[in-house]
Each structure stands twice: as C-alpha cells, then as structure tokens.
Amino acid sequence: MESKKILRSFDVRFAEEGEAFSVDESVAAAKRIGFPVVLKLLSDSIAHKTERGLVKLNIRDEASLRAAATELLAAATPEDGRVSLLVAKMEAGRRELIVGLVRDAQFGAFVMLGLGGVFAELHDDFVFAPVPVDRAGARRLIARLRQQNFFAPFRGERAVDLEQLTGAIVGVSELAESDPTIASVDINPLIVRPDGSVVAVDALIEKSKTPQPMVAAGYAVENSRRDYLSLFEPSGVVVVGASTHPGKFGFVSLHNILANGYRGRVFATNLDGSSVLGLDCLTSLDDLPQGLVDLAFVCTPSNSNEQILRACAAKGVRAVYVTSAGYADSGEDGRRLQEQLARLADELGLLLVGPNGQGIVSTAQRLCAQIVAPFPPPGRISVVSQSGNFSSSFMNYSRQTGVGIARAVSVGNAAQVGIAEFTDFFGHDDQTAVTLVYIEGIDDGRKIMEVFRRNASTKPIVAVKGGATSSGSKAASSHTGAIATNDLIFDGLCDSLGVTRVRDIEQAFDVAASFATQPLPKGRRTVVLTTVGGWGVVTADVIAEEKILELIDLPDDLMVEISRLLPSRWSRNNPIDCAGGETRETVVEIMGLVAAHPKVDAIILLGIGIQSNQAKMMRDGGFYDSGDLARIVDYHENQDRKYAKAAAELSILHEKPILVATELGVADPSNPGVVAVGETNRLCYASGQRAARALGLICKYSLFRQTEPTQ
C-alpha cells in the first residue's frame, strides 16, 4: 500500500482499491469498487505474496469474497505482524508491461521498461535509460523495445496509450531523483486494458540505508590540454630502455618512431650507451638536455619505473607512456605497485599513460610510438582502446580503406588516465571528427557517463564494448582487471546519451569512417541506386530490418525525370535498378537528380567497379594488344572513376551522404573504382548491407542531435 501511495503521487495510475481489516470491511470495499475483485493479505513483513498463496484473483461475488477473506486472515503467521486485506479492482488485458528502477553499481539509477507476463518469457525484451528521463527520453525508451507490434492495436483491443505509459516512466525517474535512498522500484504488472489505457496493479519500492549518488558531479579532466598535446604533439621524445635486440620493445618502439618520420627530436637511453639504429644512446636520463623532450616512452622493467618518473619530471618531461607489464595485470601485488606509480605521477605533475600499453599514434606529427605496427594514413578518426590489439585493428582497417586516423592510444591498465579522459580530450580536439572507443571493463562508470553526456551531443562517439556475454565478461576481467557492467545498462546509457554503440569491430570502423567523411543526413529518406539488381534487393532488406532508414517511394517528378534517361524496363521504384540501361553519363545524371531532390536525405550507390573488373580480365587475358580492347578497357575504368568522383562532389554540393559500396572494396582493393573512391577520401563500403547499417547509425545520431539540446 505504501509503495503504491508514493507512486501515485508521481503519475503512476493504479487499479482502484481499498484496505480492510475484517471480512465485513472487505465486502463493503468490494461493493464500492465493483466485482470482480482481487484480494491480498497485506503486511510490511510480506514482500512476496504469491509464493505463499496470499493472493486471490477474479472474485466475482460476496460469498466467494467472504470465503477468500476468511482463508487469507487464517493464513497469517505471528511473524507477519499486523495484517490487513487489500481489495482491488480485477483488471483484465491481454498485454502486460513491467516498469521499474534499478541501481547499477557503476552508472547509478536506471529506469527499466520491459514486456511482462507471457511476453517476458517469450521475448526477453527489456530496455534501460539513465535517470533523469524526460518525456522525450521515455518515448525513445519505448521505441527501443524490439517488439513494437506490442503497442499496435491487438485482437480487437486499441493501441497502447503511449502518453500514459510515458507518464509512468517519467514518474519513476522523478521518484528516483526525489529520494536517493530508493534502491529499486518494481511495477509489475502494468496491464494494458482493452481500451489501450495502462493501469498498475502491484508495486514494490525497496530502500537502502545509504543514499546513492545519481550521476557524476562536475567531472573535469585533471590533466591539462597541454599535457595531452605533450603526448600527441611532443617537441621531443625519449625512448627509455632502448635495445639493440630487434625483438625487444625498446628496439621496436625506437624503430617505429624513426622509420615513420617523426618530426621532432629523438633521444634514447640504455645502460651501456650503445648505438641503436644509428642513434647514440644516453646512459641515463640525467644526461637528457633540459626542456627539449615532452614525451618519455618507457620500455623498462616495472621495478625501475618510479625512478624513471622522477628523472623525467626533473628534465621537464610532461607525459610518460609506460609499456611495462607486471602491474594490475599480474595480481594484487602488481595492482598496489600500479597505484603507487599513479600517485607518484600525480605528485610530480606528469601525465601517465599505461602501464601495460601498446603505444600512441599521432599522424599529423608522423609520430608512431608503438611496440607494434601499423602506422595509418592521416585522417579524422581518433581511437582510444583498452585493447592494444583492437587499436591495431582499427589502424589496419584505416590502411586498407584509406580512411585515416588522427590519433590513437592504447590505454593499457589506465593507472591514471583511461577511456573517459581521452574521450573528453578528443571531444575538444580540432584534429578529431569522431572518437572510436573500445571498452572491456569499467571501473568508474559515473565518470564515463558524464564524459559521454557532455561530448556525444556535439561530436560523434562510436563505442564497442567487449564482455557483452557472461563468457566475454570473464575474458574482459582477466584481460584488464576491470569490472564488466551489465550489457543492457550500457546499451541504455549509450542510447540515451547519443553514443553510437556497435557490436563488432568491422562495423565500428565503417560507422566511424562514415562520421569522419560523410555529411550527417537531415532525415531518414533514403534512395538506393544500383546497376546490380541483387545487391539492391538485399540492401533494401537491411533497411527494412533495421527500421531506422526509410526506403522512400520515389516522388512522381523524380520518376518522370529518371524515365527520360532509362529504358522502360527500369525498376520504376526504389531501389532504382538501371536494368542495364546505364551509359557513361546516365548513372551520374540520375545520381544528380536524386541528390538534388528535396525529399531525399541520403543515397547508397551500388555497382561501382563492375566494369573495371571486366577491364582487368581484358588486360590480363592475353588479347589486350589486339583489336580495340585498350580503348574499351580505358572506357570502363574511366567510367568507374567518374562515378566515384561524382558521388563525392554531389554529396558535398547537396550536403547529403552518398555511400558507395561494392564487394570489390575487399575482393580487389586495386580496382580503379575502389581506388577512385579512396582518392575522394571516403570509404568504399564492402557491401550494400554494410553501407545501409552504417548509414542507419549515422542517421540515428543525426536525429538525436536534432532533438537533443546541446550541452
């Protein structure tokens, strides 16, 4: 009763009910409410009534009520204390929902919405959003449930009243804000009546003795922007622990700095002062010139690193990257050693990255301070990763596709700074257009939450989180020593704050590359233009399945214009299948018509490279020097180049994304069509399906930006 009383004051509607202390009082209450009714035995000591048989449903007359009330009162035990009877209207509906509140150990308070009753067992469909949730956020939460048909008219019943449901969700959020001692709320079930209205029939509020904070308060990057620029744009670098052995980190990191043309001063140290890669090493950091080095890249055993930090600070070094293992990655003793190293760095005013990290990249400075390859081309994507391997993977995709990287950092054990700090820095970094994040474990969820909240609304963040399954969580824990939070909670966090969460590494790069190279679509209205019919079909299927983009019906005026350029057999719908009627100019002209149309927000172009593929066979087939093949080969290759160039130019002219896709992007990266797309500094997507999924996610972010006030 008390839980319901509290929730009623926060716009949660409950079935009509009354409390009785005797059989006669229960009969009077039932007559006032109207049969049929539900009868429950109440006590502050009874949390789960159904398990004890203390709930009687669908009581239809006075005699049945008297019998049920007598039975329930007799079932009370001394441990139950003072008891009473709850008489409530028996509500009926085929559909049930669950609304609640949970407190996540990492991220704080979250509202939960899910399908209830048999639907819960069949579909396991639950979503979460961080408190506070306003009405717009509640509608987004409802839209995230997979089973959207649940809310439509159903077997003669009306559609769910979304305004009432929204009010209940917002009410639970406001309740959580008003009382930080509330540990959980469970409104179950929330019944959908035949007229579509929603009514709660039971609820439970649990409180904790210790008030819980809602979100991170006033989080700020503790290290200055100058410190991060010392890391990514140092005037000088010293490799501490350089080695003459090509298999050692101290050799590889120095090699990678020198071989990739770093533009600043380079120093190195080793104990015997030997020459490494033509560079005479210092025997000690004490010999390092004062004030000429901003960054120290440390490749020494953990037992010497505290002394190295002190020496770095004395020489004016501002940032230290530690590759050494043997810290939190090795157990509790290592964790204590790591905490001690971080405290020392704080005392000395140093930016400490690592330990147990792979390194950093800053392409504008030609800086590749890493213990492994690769070094990517310059671009606008910045990477921060808890896995060195995935940092390399993103850079490998950059090399493959030509879509470049601005900065990349493997945070290792993140003793002092990690995902939150670098995401915050990239959010204000002029060289970064999009931040690409790989997370395995989270040890300060509120800090990450606050960084996401204040950066995602102005600059895209693409996040991949490992540990989405129980097995993955165990692997992530053993890898990083951090805590893997509930995956549905993280999903809700990202969706509510505008962070683009993806499930696999390839898609993460596709989406980041789209943000970095394409204008944001102003809406969902999409046209697929194809010279290869089958790819148009499966691309349209993805658009229909994802339910983000809208594959529009072609406007009448656009149909007329396209029909003037193509034979009558063209598809006459969307996807626009040219049906073999394309010429050198036709595809470009159609693309121009579509891009210019005010009812089109985005285009996916399929089929580039097909003619160049035939041209390659003609070059290699042994007949190239005979007949007129050379002219035909040049024609085909130039045609594909023209398509690629036109796609980029029209995209810029009309400020609309035009994504070009072909399997030749991976099957034959040297194909002239694929190469030409790369020369426009855009991604050639590996398939129409991947292009559609990437476009859908940048569209979702664009719509979020349009509806969410900037911070």
Image (spheres, helix red, strand yellow):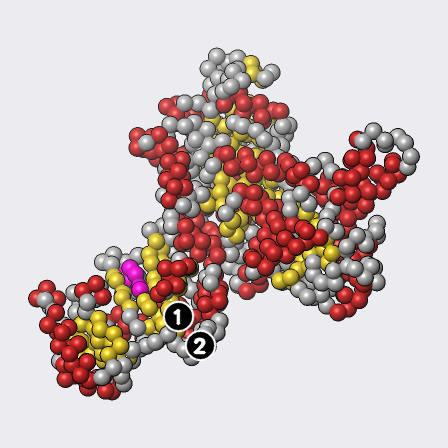
- Horizontal and vertical percent for residue 18? 23, 80
Using the image as rendered, state which of residue 613 and residue 300 is in the foreground.
613
Residue 92 seen in the figure: yes
Q: Residue furthest left?
A: 78
Residue lying at 61% horizontally and 48% vertically, measured from the top left? 690
- Label annotation for residue 95: 1
Q: Main secondary structure of the magenta part?
A: strand
Which residue type carries mark 2? Glu
Using the image as rendered, state which of residue 61 and residue 435 is in the foreground.
61
Q: Is residue 635 left or right of residue 425?
A: right
Residue 676 seen in the figure: no
Residue lying at 55% horizontally and 29% vertically, measured from the top left? 369
User: Does 487 appear in magenta?
Assistant: no
Q: On the image, numbered disc 2 is attached to which residue?
A: 157
Residue lying at 38% horizontally and 67% vertically, measured from the top left? 97
Which residue type carries mark 1? Arg
